Every structure is written in structure tokens, then in C-alpha cells.
Image (cartoon, rainbow, N blue to C red):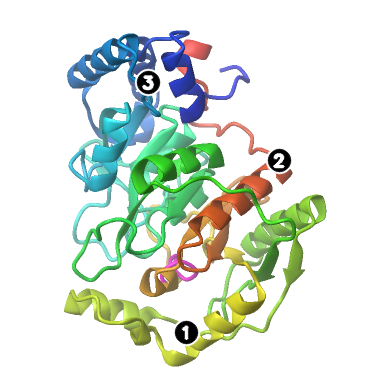
Amino acid sequence: MGNTPPRTAVETADRVTRAVASAVETVRAALTDAHRIRHLRAFVELWPGSALDRAAEVDARVADGARLPLAGVPLAVKAAEGTASHQARRLIAAGAVPIGATSVPAPGTRWKTWGHTDGGPTLNPWRADRVPGGSSAGSAVAVATGVVPLATASDGAGSTRIPAAWCGVLGYKPTTGLLPARDRAGLTVGGPIARTVSDLELYRSTVLGGASAAAPAHVRVAWSPTLGFNRPDPEVVAVAERALRRWARTCGVTLSEPRLALTDPAESWLSRREQNSPGSQTDVGVDNLSALAELFAAADLLATPATPNPPHPHSGPGEVMSVGFTWLFNLTGHPALSLPAGLTPDGLPVGLHLVARHHEDALLLAAARSAEQALPSLPENPLGGGVRASER
């Protein structure tokens, strides 16, 4: 399959804008690649006709002098949202071309870390016997295999960050309130899955209107391997911590290890979802809020593993709550993301989870860009590759 990495959204839009490539040929290549990974069942629908028509419209607009930040960028959209969500509409208006709807879990399951299609479950591109994470399962697989550089997702308990972590890509949950809530409980926030921080920043500028920022000269990061209530797999913790310490050594990040003793937010999260009402932040618990306020007074970021467990078999996660590190921040509203930290000894991706203060999304992404530059890239995933048909 070759060693050329798939192009980013930033690179793709630049090529289409400069007429080095057309949106039509770019989208056609993405559709070809979507068929190439059909064994992974990332998509529930492909839209070749409408995608190529829209790509032709983008080419015509570019020829007329339009400046489109996402000109000709193939976009996968989460099936539960489609193209009608606020984020999808903003991306499409900026020149992105939706090529299909990605898989989400079927109703009625107790866990949501897999994707359902008529052909069977969505497969993790690193190991076919493991789930890709969810609920934005197909979006993560489509990005991880290089079919698209950018996909829409949504995150009510970790549904953007968990599949990103388990497929070896990036997932970003913005500060709650920057996008219209996807549920009446105010838990579910839209966001992107991408392969690079530059593409997350492109998403942010296009959808949220925020400008990029430089990382502070001395980023202060507090590391917590448990948050006080998780019992994570030691291999997962080791991979995430090793990545964090490499970033710290390479970029001068100041690390601390506070004795963070938060309480499990399960009851608060389930209660808010059951009541289908936003409630208030105090539902999380005064002690939790106080501890987080104290932590963010002394640190710029909180770092944890993205999940307590590696990707689990299709039979289910057992007793482990895969949302153990993520769903607290759906209740509190803090911005958070997962970036690739490395692989476990048996070759499964692990995510490093970073959380910032409210509305400090620019700092969060700037810090992630610094970490991305310090950490080695993951190898090509064995089942889906990551090389576009047009580049082989």
C-alpha cells in the first residue's frame, strides 16, 4: 500500500484551491477508498452521485474565485447526525463534500462502543476481533484508514474521544455551549475526528469561529492515571504516561501528579440522561467541582488515559466502563480531546486524554499540536491501511 501518508484536510483544500487537483477527482478517490475498506463496515451509506455533483459545484466556485477553507475536502458524517447538524452545515458551506454516512450502534445494546451495519458490526482497523469504539464508530474508522481526513462525530459520554483513541486518531469535544446541544440533557456535543491537530484547528475556525493560538512557553500539565475512581489496565496507563513524559521532555512541559480523588460521576450522568434535562453543574458534586477548580488554578491541562481499557472484543467490555475518563467532562462542560499515544504490546491504540479550562479550546489545541510534534506517528493500521487510492 506504500508509505505515503494520506493528505490532511488543510493540504487537500490547498491543492483544490490552487487547482493542483480538482474536487471531483479528490472525491472520486475517496469513494474508491471507501469501497477499499468495505470489509471494515465503516459506512452505512455512500452518496457517489450527490458527492460528485457537489464536488463539481466546488470546482466551479473555486474557478470563479471563491475562497473556501475546506474546498473539496471529502467528509464523512455520523449517521445519527447526517448533513443537517450545525457542524455539518458549516463544513459543507466551507467547501467540504459529504461522501456518506458512518456507522453508529444499533438501539438496544447496553454498551455503545461498536457500529452496526446491515453487513455486520464495524471492525477496528487494527484488529478485526476488536470494536472501534463508539458511538462515532464509523467516523473514526473512515479517518483512521485514510478514506477521509475529517469526519463529524458527537460526544455525550466520550463518543468522539473513545473511538478516536481506539482507532489511533484525534477526537475533540469542544467546550459545552459552543455548539447547539444534540440532546435535551445538554450532554452531547458535536465535534470532529481527524488525523492531525491542524485539521482540528481548521474545524474549529470553520465551525466555531475560533482562531488558532500558540502554546504557552511553559505548559503545566497535571497527570492523573485514575481520576481517583478508575481501575485502568496497567498497559494502557503505561502507554499514555510514556507519551506524556516524552512530550514533557521534548517540549519543556511541566508535569505534576496531584492526588486527585474525584468521585465516579456515573449516578449524576445517568440521572441527567434519564431526566432529559440539563440540570446544573452542581449535579456533578460540589467536591468534584472544587477539586477541579483547585487543579486548574495550578495547571493548564489535566492529562489522563483516554479510556481505562484497550479496545475490547465484539462480545462486550465486561465490567469495565470505557467512559471512565471521559463522561465526567460531558457533565462539567470542559473541552477535551484524545490524541494517539502509542500502541499496547499486542498492537492496540491508546489515547492520551487532555482536558482544559472552560473556553480554553485554543490552548487545548495548541498544546495538542505541541504533543503531536513530539510524539512518533503510529504505523499504518494493518487492516485498513491509510493511503489514498490517488497516492498509491
Q: Is residue 231 left or right of residue 243?
A: left
Q: Amino acid at mark 2?
A: Pro
Mark 1 lies on residue: 289
Q: Quadrant of residue 94?
A: top left
Q: Amino acid at mark 1?
A: Leu
Q: Which mark is residue 30?
A: 3
Alpha carbons under labels 3 and 1: distance apart: 44 Å
Mark 2 and mark 1 lie on one chain; the one further toward the N terminus is: 1
Alpha carbons under labels 3 and 2: distance apart: 26 Å
Q: Residue at x 49, y 42 (%)?
A: 201
Q: Is residue 295 magenta?
A: no
Mark 2 lies on residue: 376
Residue 198, position in %: x, y? 54, 38
Residue range (magenta)? 322-327
Q: Residue at x 70, y 58 (%)?
A: 244
Mark 3 and mark 2 lie on one chain; the one further toward the N terminus is: 3
Front residue (pair 387, 346) = 387
